[in-house]
Amino acid sequence: MTDEELKDLDREVKKLKRISTEWAGQLHDLVEDKLPAGYLEIPAIAQSTYDACKAWADANARLQAAQKEMA
């Protein structure tokens, strides 16, 4: 992996972390502000939060592996 590819992957990880944090914020807001009336929103928001966090975790694992490879 080139230095440029490593930088691109690092940017991707940061972007995915931001997205997962935004979804976590929506889940938090749902819990704090909309429950119990908004209970029907739980599955969709929870799934989106999970998907975003999983995407970040996968990209972060690739980044860590690439960094070890470069060391």
Image: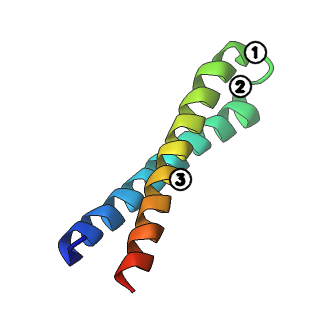
Q: CA distance from mark 1 to mark 3?
A: 32 Å
Q: Is residue 25 left or right of residue 10?
A: right
Nearer mark to the viewer, of 2 and 3:
3
Picture disc at residue 34: 2
Residue at left offset 47%, top offset 70%: 64
Q: Position of residue 60 (x, y in %)?
A: 47, 60
Q: Earlier in the sequence, mark 2 or mark 3?
A: 2
Residue at left offset 38%, top offset 70%: 66
Residue named by callout 3:
57
- Element at label 1: loop
Up-down: is 13 above or below 32? below
Indicate the colouring scheme.
rainbow
Nearest the eye: 27 or 9: 9
Picture disc at residue 37: 1
Image quadrant holding the C terminus, namely: bottom left
Q: CA distance from mark 2 to mark 3?
A: 28 Å
The type of residue carrying mark 2 is Lys
Q: Is residue 4 left or right of residue 53?
A: left
Q: Earlier in the sequence, mark 1 or mark 3?
A: 1
